[in-house]
Amino acid sequence: MKEIDSESFEALSQVLPNTSNATHMIQMAMANSGSSAAAQAGQDQLDRSKWLLDCPEPPSPWHELKSQVTDSFRTRAKRFKSLRKQPLPQRILSILQAVFPIFGWGRNYKLTMFKNDLMAGLTLASLCIPQSIGYATLAKLDPQYGLYTSVVPPLIYALMGTSREIAIGPVAVVSLLISSMLQKLIDPETDPLGYKKLVLTTTFFAGIFQASFGLFRLGFLVDFLSHAAIVGFMGGAAIVIGLQQLKGLLGITNFTTNTDIVSVLRAVWRSCQQQWSPHTFILGCSFLSFILITRFIGKKNKKLFWLPAIAPLIAVVVSTLMVFLTKADEHGVKTVRHIKGGLNPISIHDLDFDTPHLGQIAKIGLIVALVALTEAIAVGRSFAGIKGYRLDGNKEMVAIGFMNVLGSFTSCYAATGSFSRTAVNFAAGCETAMSNIVMAVTVFVALECLTRLLYYTPIAILASIILSALPGLIDINEAIHIWKIDKFDFLALIGAFFGVLFGSVEIGLLVAVVISFAKIILISIRPGIETLGRMPGTDSFADTDQYPMTVKTPGVLIFRVKSALLCFANASSIEERIMGWVNEEEEEENTKSNASRKILFVILDMSNLINVDTSGIAALVELHNNLIKTGVELVIVNPKWQVIHKLTQVKFVNKIGGKVYLTIGEALDACFGLKV
């Protein structure tokens, strides 16, 4: 190690007397270089350095994967052994509770709880019936398919789901996803039967993907759609859905199949110049105003929560009666006309796996699965947090997956948790998932008895019901909050919003995912370097920019790598920045003290580094060589397991003279105290 000349030591002594333990080491070493205390201190530091250098070989990636799989099987084996020790009836009940949570909470179910669930379920059905019909038309399906989707999936979820409040059924965003992507494969106007088969097959694939995510614990895939991306996507989708409802609100016959805002506005402009129905527009706007007013009243008076919930049903009943009595359908007001009633027909034979579009259907099913799961889990976790219980994400995925698979067998399209209906369910005082069962039974009764009464229901009313639900999808306050907190997240939000608005639904999702991944990559590998100094009166070292009161150690530059990975993407930049700082510091010191001070050591804190690749090692070697040329020695502090293992393998530790220490304080003591 380099000897410290008298001028450098004098400068060190003037700066360090109250700020560093190294001062005492220096004074002791100068007073008695052969003292036993100094020798013992040196031996202790060598021993601690050996802890780093002599650590065992870290496990390989294959070994880590094998351990995770083994641990998973071992946990399940323990559960199986514990089940085998139980009596047969108890064993069967435990298995049933694991697969069907209803066997758990159902044992403690009381009549008072059922009264609350009955009220919530009936309130939910009054909102669900008109919304389901409207969302089916949004998905380019006949109205009864929305009602079918509100019968079987809620029943399956009530058996398998873990959320007490979530309301299952068709939702606007998933309906838009399905129609916008599948109508590019088959036109629903010219081939409705073929289109229906594609929708059911897509629902089947979506359910398979969702159940697989839960069974194989792949829920992290849902997190690829970040919260900011979902906020932007929902906002863009809401505007697109709203513009598409202008077809029903204006009574337009011919309309574009594109979903971008330019195409939709162009179609509206052309149609308005040719033919539209003023009666339809007035009727739709009147009931839209009525629904929005009731929602405002419900927000002002919490006791009237039921008023906005039943407002869509009131709008359907009153408008249907008005059209029937005035015969407005003969004067240009378009109506729903025939809705096929009865129990959900079996549709296994409608699943089409021989279609040439199977690969595209599977891709669309994956997108639908991710979006539906993201919405359902976000809704479920929000209300579970309010009630103070934990939602099992993997069980939720399995439940939603199975309900969509079985739904595709019974003429249902993709269903998920609806935020607006879940809020109504919660406000109505639901206790358990029994409210979903009540809602499903009520919708089934409507399918059996009330479909003929919906013949004269105006299309404009369904459009107004959908439009009334859209403001809840546009969260301006959350967008402002995201802008204040994280600009990168806001960029993902804007990308998703404008991608959906001016491109398509899949383009908006793709842009959001790409921006989110770019953010992860930039944060993970961007060349972050900070200079450290000692906090006054402590042995802690901190960033000199964040804490201007920190004291720099003369003759030493201390750097910390802020990136978790030293790799090909940032290694050269980090090496260049360190050398630039060293040269700049030496020029500054030479100017101030006429070369009386000199940089002796560069201490590199690696406590943040998790791993290093060959490019990173090459950059460290180059940094060491360049520092040696300028008379500066490199010291490494606190390298992680994988890092020190690789540096030892390539003999880099030997090249720097074994100067590897556990802490910055020990590195300073060793550099200045033991070799003076």
Image (cartoon, rainbow, N blue to C red):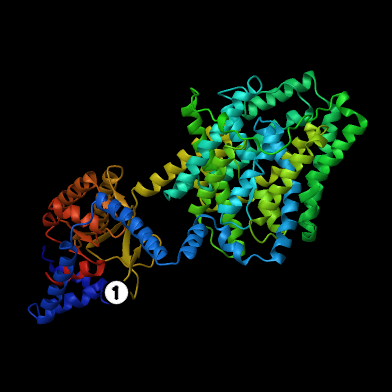
Task: Report which quarter residue 2 is drawn in.
Answer: bottom left
* Residue 383 location (% of width, % of height): 61, 58
Residue 337 visible (yes or no): yes
At x 81% / y 27%, what residue is drawn? 334
Quarter of the rendering occupied by the N terminus: bottom left
At x 76% / y 47%, what residue is drawn? 126
In depth, the one of 91 and 490 nearer the eye is 91
The three-letter amino acid code for the residue at tag 1 is Thr
Residue reaching furthest to the left? 34
* Residue 111 location (% of width, % of height): 71, 65
Q: How many marks?
A: 1
Residue 417 visible (yes or no): no
Residue reaching furthest to the front? 88
* Residue 663 location (% of width, % of height): 25, 67
Q: Is 220 displayed left or right of 639 in the figure?
A: right
Quarter of the rendering occupied by the C terminus: bottom left
At x 43% / y 45%, what residue is drawn? 519
At x 11% / y 69%, what residue is drawn? 675
* Residue 210 location (% of width, % of height): 50, 44
- For label 1, the residue is 19
Q: Is 531 displayed left or right of 206 in the figure?
A: left
Using the image, determine if residue 9 lies above or below residue 318: below
Mark 1, Cα crowd under 10 Å, few <14 / some 14-19 / many 20+, is: some
